Image: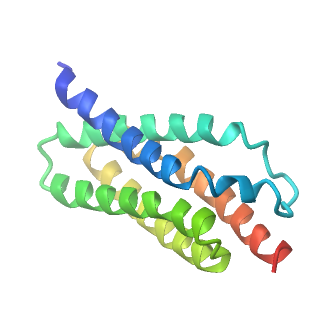
Amino acid sequence: MINLKSLIVSLLIPLAVGSISGFLSMESMKIYKTLNQPSFAPPSFLFPIVWSILYILMGISSYIVYESNSPLKNKALKVYAIQLLMNFIWPLIFFNAQMYLFSFIWLLAIWCLVLFMIILFSKIKPISGYIQIPYLLWLTFAAYLNLGVYFLNK
């Protein structure tokens, strides 16, 4: 049985984190459009669409883990919260501070945390880990874009 209140809260948390981070870096994103971009850089309108989908998937995964009785639940949710916090900070480093190399290193740390989160989530309920694979793939692509921006705009 679905706990509707928990599901809504689980969805709202990552969506709110992403929205606030996006709002805080919105003005600085204008600079991004003026930078030299690596090949395969998608159009800017695609980013909020992809991130919204990924945040919804994060919410669903965290809900599944939260509703479980697994002894790993607390550890998994802590890793989830840490990666979400780091995800919140990344646009501030990349867009606002324009620290492209540091933001790439930060992104690698997020990538490692998300991989660890996927492993923990999968041990609790495999589907909760599997639906985070698109997030890990997007982070991999984002790391390519981030590093490309660094090298093309030094």
The residue drawn where x is 21% and y is 21% is 4
Image vertical order of residue 4 relative to residue 77, above or below: above
State the quadrant of the C terminus: bottom right
The residue drawn where x is 72% and y is 53% is 30
State the quadrant of the N terminus: top left
Left/right of residue 148 with respect to residue 119 in the rendered view? right
**How far across and how far down the image is residue 82, in percent?**
32, 63
- Tell me the quarter of the picture where residue 15 sits: top left
Of residue 25 and residue 115, the one placed in the foreground of this image is: 25
Q: What is the count of numbered marks?
A: 0
**Colour convention:** rainbow
Image vertical order of residue 100 relative to residue 15, above or below: below
Of residue 95 and residue 5, the one placed in the foreground of this image is: 95
The residue drawn where x is 32% and y is 35% is 12
Left/right of residue 130 with respect to residue 3 in the rendered view? right
**How far across and how far down the image is residue 145, in percent?**
73, 61
Image vertical order of residue 138 relative to residue 154, above or below: above
Of residue 67 and residue 149, the one placed in the foreground of this image is: 149
Of residue 56 and residue 92, the one placed in the foreground of this image is: 92
Left/right of residue 150 with respect to residue 65 in the rendered view? right
Left/right of residue 70 with respect to residue 30 in the rendered view? left
